[in-house]
Structures are given as structure tokens and as C-alpha cells.
Image: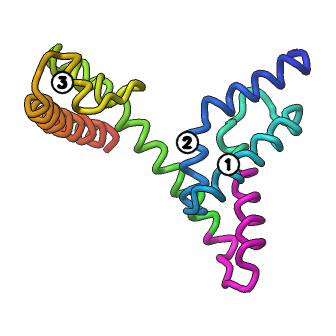
Amino acid sequence: MEQPDAHLRHVQSQFLQQTNRLRGFILGLLPDRAAADDVLQKVFLIVTAKAAEFQGGTDFLAWVRTIARLKVLEQRQRRFPAAGQLTDDAWDMLAQSAHEVDDLWDARRQALEQCLGELAPRAREVVQLRYSSERLSLEEVALRMSWTVGSVKVALSRAKDVLWGCVQRQMTATEAIKE
């Protein structure tokens, strides 16, 4: 059995790994970025406080989404007490659709990763410089690659077209396998 501190660190680590998905889920229910960030912070505090309640081997994201859903409801009731509220069934349908969107997003991300590997090396390099964690401007990419800004734009446009087509083929193939 995990020690309490180790379990807490594990739960917090899982939360951090799922932050982007959780933020997307919250934004789907509460489209105000500042309010969504407030809810996300509150959810982290609750998850930390209730870490001992999380059972390892169960669906962490489902557990944390349940907490987030309740916090979103509280936030909406505080901000719009007189507004018409969605029924519990409507909230459940919204939450379920978020699971479906996440599954689709995971499949698309996996397809994109595979398709990136199929790009020519220079095309992959220009895409990575522009869209990776560095997020270089067009001018910075051009300077780094010793190209003109126009050449960078053309290369990115062509790479996007190739990636779009590749991802679409991958997704179609995935759907065909499921059926």
C-alpha cells in the first residue's frame, strides 16, 4: 500500500498530467476563461484535500471531472442565481459529450504524431519550430532556417495540407476498423 505522502504526490501528478483536458472540460461548461481558471484552481485544492479518497486503478479523470462539474455548478449559481439553470440530465449530457470529445481528440493527436513522422525532415523542422513549445514567430523561424519569411509561410502551408490529409486518412481508417 502506498504511503499517504506518496499517494498525495501521485494524485497531484495525475492532476497535472490531465490539466489541459480538465481545463477544456471546464471551459466547455463555463466559457469564461478567468472563471474557468478559478474553478480549475479550486478543483486542484479539493483533489489535494481528498487525495486519500481516490482509489488507485480507477478512472482518475472521471473522478476529477465530477469534482469540476460540481464546482462549475457552484460558480454558475453564484454568478447567475436568477438565470434559468440546466437540469441535472442536461449537465450529465454535457459531461458525457466531453468524454466523447476527449476520445476523439486523443485519436486525432495520435494520428498527428504519426503524420508528423512522415513529413520530410525540413518540413517537420519548420513545423516544430513554429508550433512546438518554442512557438517561434515566422521571422524567427526564417532566421533560424536561413529562409525568407515567404518561404516559411509556403513550407508551413504545404506541411499543414499534408498533415491535414494524413490525419483525415488516419481517422477514416480508425473509424473503419471500429465498424
Q: Which residue is mark 1?
A: 65
Residue type indicated by callout 2: Arg
Name the one closer to the observer, 124 or 97: 124
Residue type indicated by callout 1: Arg
Q: Residues within 10 Å of mark 2 (few under 14, many from 20)?
A: some
Q: Which residues are magenta?
A: 66-90
Whether the residues at callouts 3 and 2 have beta carbons within 8 Å, the answer is no
Residue type indicated by callout 3: Ala
Would you say 53 lies left or right of 12 here?
right
Residue 78 horizontal/vertical position (percent): 78, 71
Q: Residues within 10 Å of mark 3 (few under 14, many from 20)?
A: many
Name the one closer to the observer, 25 or 106: 25
**Which sits earlier in the primary sequence, circle 1 or circle 3?**
1
Q: Which residue is mark 3?
A: 142
Residue 175 horizontal/vertical position (percent): 30, 42
Magenta span has 73? yes
Q: Which residue is mark 2?
A: 21
Q: Residue at x 90, y 15 (%)?
A: 3
Q: Quadrant of residue 159?
A: top left
- Name the quadrant of the C terminus: top left
